[in-house]
Every structure is written in structure tokens, then in C-alpha cells.
Image (tube, coloured by chain):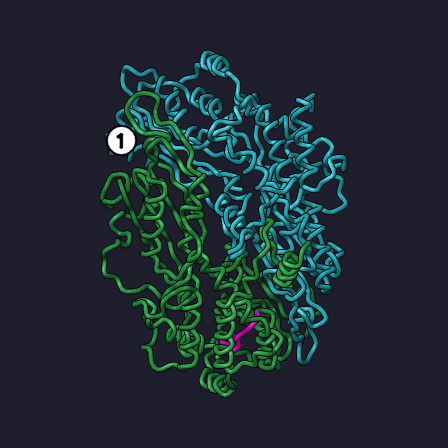
Chain colours: A cyan, B green
Amino acid sequence: MGALNEGRFNVELENGVTLGGCVELGLEREPETVAIEDAVKVLLQGLGEDINREGLRKTPLRVAKALREGTRGYREKVKDIVQGALFPEAGLESGIGYAGGAGGLVVVRDLDLFSYCESCLLPFLVKCHIGYVPSGHQVVGLSKLSRVADVFAKRLQDPQRLADEVCSALQHSIKPAGVAVVLQCSHIHFPSFESAFLESNHCGWAKMLVSSGSGVFENEKADIWGNFLSLLKFRAINVEKIHLRDSADKCWCPSQTTSKIGPANSGMTSAVASILRSLGEDPSRKELLGTPTRFVKWLMNFKNSNLEMKLNGFVLGRTDTLKSTYYDEHIHSELNLSFWSQCEHHLLPFHGVVHIGYIYTEAVNPIGKSLLQSIVHFHGFKLQVQERLTRQIAETASSLLGGDVMVVVEAHHTCMVSRGIEKFGSNTATVAVLGRFSTDQTARAKFLQTIPNSTTTGG
Amino acid sequence: MGALNEGRFNVELENGVTLGGCVELGLEREPETVAIEDAVKVLLQGLGEDINREGLRKTPLRVAKALREGTRGYREKVKDIVQGALFPEAGLESGIGYAGGAGGLVVVRDLDLFSYCESCLLPFLVKCHIGYVPSGHQVVGLSKLSRVADVFAKRLQDPQRLADEVCSALQHSIKPAGVAVVLQCSHIHFPSFESAFLESNHCGWAKMLVSSGSGVFENEKADIWGNFLSLLKFRAINVEKIHLRDSADKCWCPSQTTSKIGPANSGMTSAVASILRSLGEDPSRKELLGTPTRFVKWLMNFKNSNLEMKLNGFVLGRTDTLKSTYYDEHIHSELNLSFWSQCEHHLLPFHGVVHIGYIYTEAVNPIGKSLLQSIVHFHGFKLQVQERLTRQIAETASSLLGGDVMVVVEAHHTCMVSRGIEKFGSNTATVAVLGRFSTDQTARAKFLQTIPNSTTTGG
């Protein structure tokens, strides 16, 4: 093994990832990656963080790698994917009609993808459905429909443009009689730090359904659209109700509607503009003009400041009466307290629900759900890891509730989806047990049984 | 760009896949890959196929790449994945209990993986749940639990050994207080060509639930197992009912129970043994002794022989009366006819249901569901692509049903999961329309409306 190969091997070990028999070619040494790392350091410092603390030390590199891998579509070519995967396939041998490589509609449903919102730089989830009508006696390998869609998903996108680009690329590379694309997109919707304390039942996702068609699907009133949607089992959805290409709806990104954009730290916005450039984008492109400011505004929700006083204010302000959702002799459960947080390893959101159980004795003053919700928000709105969030909530709750406290946090982590791992359905739970819960299995089991089966907020 | 890099670039174009900024290092030129290609050619010839026909020309290479990528776990090290992803994390600041990096249970649920059955070489699906109890004031990055599980999934496996190896590897690399692994495994269960015609309602999946524990999870009766399973929301499942390590259950693989193993083509079994060696396995390992024979026996279900006579035999033998599941004026629908087939591009199973609609007139003799089911099986049991299968079923049905026929095939493709693409939830639909269905949108829509919403066979 020569020196060059050994160098590569070391890179591989550092990354800790080997993908399908290939070794990373030092992505992390490329100037674009280094530039993003530097920009992320500026952002972390803007948040008041110590960039040398253990949990954050490698965060700039992790963020840079995730962003570059997550936008690798800029460096991929559809032609390279489709060529070699077009197969001759006969049509009908006789008779009138359409089948096989001459007109037999092919539909691939429920492809899970993710993309990056060009308006705020956060990843969004895409459930992708593709149909095409073969012509010229050829069909394309089914997996290539997914791979081509991924080329455009792995860029900074807007749902409608994503649908249009996938449709157009498939039309030009396969040259079928027509292509139809339907995308169900889900964009995480964080409340701001301030509004989280005020609004309850905040809706966690902005959703959008878009479609695009070419060839025989060009006219969205064509019969074949009805057949395609019927095969998607979207029977309740009228074709006309799908968001159409030319409608003038405003941007779906929640960052566009929440609070007007005021001034943001210019060093931080410059850093985000530099990230955009490093990804191969033009920060002066119309749709990207406000992106750095929006991203920074959003990030500042997680500023590391002394919020203790703020929490105390809420403690004093909220003296609502006890409304436990569960009461079993001595065990109270407060279930489904929503939380929002930001993973400090990847600067990506994680969110879900918190369940708090405590043992009620005469010495304990029961406290209201809204106070516990405030404690949850207080610890959520910073750079976090779920294990620490769980412990901190338990400790704060314990100081108010007499020491016998159990906390379960259930969460979806964007970093489990929007990186190489791409585990779409996965979710996590963490537990802290304090006082009598740590020795009393019956108490633990009783509390755990009060947690409903589906509490996690799906995409 | 030097000559070496250009060579790599060409490989990349040929593969049509670029993964996260890394370029494949000519996996397809490695001697192991070439050896598998040669073995696959022997298998295709044993099936009576022309290895030079267009759809099969690259099949040996595709199979070789998929198998080597799908068993890349043999070439990965857990230490490389975990090191650099262990983070210091405090436990409780005061008081009695467990939280954070000192005893706070962490659970990652619903990781979708796939593995290869060592008994028959087919991929099986794994829904993986992992729990661990941090100790020593450190936690591991959540995604690493998935990556480590994947190292062992990407090998020839048995569910229990997979669970044990993942558990042991996490215990040794993270050194926590304990690790628990629960796997829900689903193995495709094909009927043989012969039995498919005789059995109706064949169950498509063999399922198995296994668990493994170390440290505080070593004793499967420990309280913490109850807490862990409660967090998995497996409340109906008793811990004792989970398949335990030391129980002497026989192998779960359906190929072990279907038909006794008789002699198989020795050239083909030698070819499979050579594949095992090329993957880095020892074909004389006890669990692998019968694997080549079982794989060949299974593959021979898809032998390209003249089965026309066989079909005719069934046509004559089955004259049961008409039992349409749907009747609308003139349109009959026969729904959910199960099919099993083998993707000719990847030598991997695809299976699902077929729906056949036809227009009934006085000139048409209605035919029974079992005859249509026989037609479906007849066209399914060969090397296929879904588009062709759909057309062939439509053409055969049309010759019996008067020419106005519409066919929808809904399928799950193993090749959409058990390769780099890993799209676990995806499924496909293909359509053929003959005669009046090709011009009458109302007839098409009526037939499509009769197809139930959930007809595809899940994993």
C-alpha cells in the first residue's frame, strides 16, 4: 500500500464511515469544506458558545460535511445515472392498447427523500411519487427514478421547483411519452423562543403538496392524471386541489411568515452567505437574498445566554391550578409537553414531547402543566443533546417537585435523516429517574404505562 | 487531473453513482467481484437464460456489486465508527438517581436495516431497536448505534446472531452499563412454483423477534428490560415471549422447511459456494453447508422452460364458477391475485398483487379467479421485469376474455431495498390497458376505483 493510499486510509478512519467499498477522497480537506467550517465557527461564537468545548469541537466539521453531502446534487449528472439503465422492453404484441415499453404507465410510490429549504437552510422531508409512460420500447430501471429525484433533492430547493426539475430531467433523459411527479413535503415549523412560551399546541410541520407533469401529463386536466392519482390512492384529493405550477402562492417556509426580519448580526449573516457560496450557490439569487438573515434569526433562538431570570419570571407568572392528565395513588404524570431543540453536534433541529412523572406527597406542592412546559422550553432552546436535556428537565422539575421525578423525552432528530444515515422512520427516547423512581420498579412501570403509544410528532 | 484520477472518474460514470463526495475505487475490477460475476453467469445459464440478452447482459455485474456492497460489514470495524463519537456528558449534579451520562437509559427505535440470510442468501428486513445505559459520564452519538448495527447487518446472518453481535460490539466499544437489542425480522417466503398453484392465501413473510442483552440487560428478567420494552411500546409482548438466546428453535428461514433438499445442479451449487468465498465467508462453516443447494433449488423456480403446457393443464383442470369480487354493469374486477417473481436485473425477488379488470359482454365467457391466478403465477415464475409481467398477464388474459382488459400490478421490489438505494417504504405500480380500456377513461377510472387502498404486502 503506497503513501497515497495510506493517507486515504487515515481519512477513512477519521470519518469513521466507509460507503459501499469506496473511500472518501478527503472531502474534509477541500477548500469549500474548510470555508464552511470557518463560517460555522462564526455562527457558534455568535451564539455565545465556546467552540473548543468537547461537544462542539468537531461540530463545524460535522456541519460542513453534512451540508456538502446534503447538497451533492450540484455535483451529480442525471445522464450518468440513467445511461446504462435503459432497457429494451416490448409493447403489446398485437391488439389495441398500451403496455410494457409502449405506453404502460409505471408508478414508483413513497420514496423518502430530504431536501434543503432555500429560504431558511433547514432540511425538509419529501415523500416522492413518480409516474412515467414508457415509449420507444424502452423502460428505465426503477431505482433510477429515485436516484434522479435525489440529484435535485440534494440541493437548496423549493418544493415546486424540485418537482419541476425532477420531471424535466426524467423527461429529457428517458424521453418517455410523459412524466408526472407528486411531492408531499413537510417543513419543520419551530415557534420562536418567545412564542413557544405563549402558544400551546403549536403545529410542528408546514406541509405542501406539489405536482409537475410533462408530455402526456403536461395538461393537468388530462385523464391520465386521474389514473395516476388513483394509483397513488389519493382518492380524496382532487387534481385541481394540488398546488399548481403557475399559482402565485407565497413561500411555504415558516421562516417567511414568522416575525418580520429586522437587523441580524452582520458577521453571522456574512458567514451564512459564505456557506451558500461554498455549496456552489449564488447568495444574490433572488430566492436566497433573505436566507442568511432568516437562518441567523432562527439560530438565535438557541443563543446561550443566562435565561434563568426569564424562567423565574414564568414561574411567578404562572400559578394555574393542577390539571394532571393521570393520577394513580401517588404518581402524577404530565404527558406530551412539546419541546424544540437544536442538536449541538450537527446544528440541526430535534423536537418531540416530554413526559414527566412525579410522586405526590403532602410535602409537595403540585405545580401546573404550564410551568412544567416552561421548564421544558427553557432547557430546549439552546444547543443541546437529548441526554442532557432530559437530565436538566429532571433536575429542574425535581427541585420543585420534591425529588421523586421521572422524565422521558421522545424525539425525532433531523440529524438521523438529513445525513448519510437517512433513517427516516427512526426516533429516540431518553430517560432520567430521580429519587424513589430509581429504586422502585413498580413506580417506574406505572409511570411508563401512562405514556401513550403514539406521542412522537411524525413528518 | 492525473491518469489515476481519470481512471476513477470513468469508473464513476460507469457506475452512475457518486456517494457523498467519494468515488468508488473500482469495486467492479476487484478479483472478488469478477469471481462473483463468473458465478452468476453459471447460474443464469443453469436457468436456461441467454446471458447476452440485453436485460441480462449487466446482471452478473449488478448482482456482484449488490452482494459485495450488501456484505461490506465484513470489511468495516466498529472501533472506527465509534471512536470520535463518544462525548463527555454529566450525570446528576446531586441527589439519588440516574440521568445523562451516568445511567440515563437511551433508546433508538425503528431503525430500518436489511441483512442477508445465511441459510438461503436472500435479503431479509430488520426493524432494529437499541437501548443502552451510559456510564463513565459519556454518551455516544445517536447515529452511531445505527451505523454499528449496520456493520453486522451487512453480513450473512441469522437474526439471533445479528442481535448478539450488535449487542456485544456496542458493549465493548462504548463500555456502557448495559446494552439491549431487539430485532423484528421479516424474511420473504416464496411458495415453490408447484405449490403456488395449489395453495391460495400463501403467507408472504416469515417473521421473527429476537433480543440480546449485556451488562444490566444480561438477565432478561431484570426490571430494566421491562422499562426498555415499555419504551418500545411493545406492551402486548411479554419479555418471556421474545425469542431467547438459548432456546433451541430451528432455523427461521423458509427454505429450511420447504421441500427436502434433493440433488441440485452441481455446477450451480459450486458457483454459489464460490460466491460465498468471494464475500469472505467459509462455505464449510456449519450454517452455510446447505446454503448453495438451497439457493439453487429456490432459483430453479424461475427456470426458463416451456411451461405453456403446464398452464394449459391448469386451464383445463380449473373450471370453477365465476366469483367476481366486483361487478359494475359491464366491468368485472378480479383483485389481489398474489404473484411472486424474480427481478432479472438483480436476481432479487419482487412480489405483490395483480388486479385484472375486463369488460363483460355476451360474447365473453367469464372465467374463474383461480384460472386468472394461474396465469399470474405462470408469468411470475421466471426472470422478469414488472413492466413485462404486466403486459404478459394482460395479453394472456385478453386472449381468454375478449380483448378489453386492464391490468394493474402492485409490487415490493427487494432490489429497491437491499442495495445502496435502501428505499424501505417504496413500492411500484404498473398498468396495461387493452381494447376499450385504452380509449374509455370512464372504464379505466371505474376499474381503478375498485382497487383497495392497501393491497401491497408489507414487510
Image-based side of B97 in relation to B452, left or right: left
Local crowd size for mark 1, using a 10 Å CA cut-off: few (<14), some (14–19), many (≥20): many
Residue with the most extreme front position: A3
Q: Nearer the viewer, residue A175 or A235?
A: A175
Coordinates of residue B26 in the picture (x, y in percent) = 57, 61
Residue under mark 1: which chain is it in?
A
Q: x, y (%) of residue A188?
A: 57, 36
Q: Nearer the viewer, residue B405 or A363?
A: A363
Q: Magenta includes B384?
A: yes
Residue B347 shown left or right of residue A108 in the figure: left
Q: Which residue is mark 1?
A: A443
Q: Residue visible at 30% across and 64% down?
A: B251
Q: Percent x, y for residue A349? A: 54, 34
Q: Is residue B152 magenta?
A: no
* Range of magenta residues: B378-385
Q: Nearer the viewer, residue B337 or B220?
A: B220
Picture coordinates of residue B438, whole percent (x, y): 69, 70
Image position of A408 with respect to B71: above or below:
above
Query: Residue A259 appears in which quarter of the rendering?
Result: top right
* Amino acid of disc 1: Ala
| Residue at 62% from the left image edge and 73% from the top image edge | B405
Res. B376 in view? no
For the residue labelled by badge 1, is the local secondary structure a helix, a strand or a loop?
Answer: helix
Q: Residue at x 32, y 67 (%)?
A: B285
Q: Is residue A53 visible?
A: yes
Which image quadrant for residue B205?
bottom left
Against A326, residue B282 (above or below) is: below
Q: Which corner quadrant holds the C terminus of chain A?
A: top right
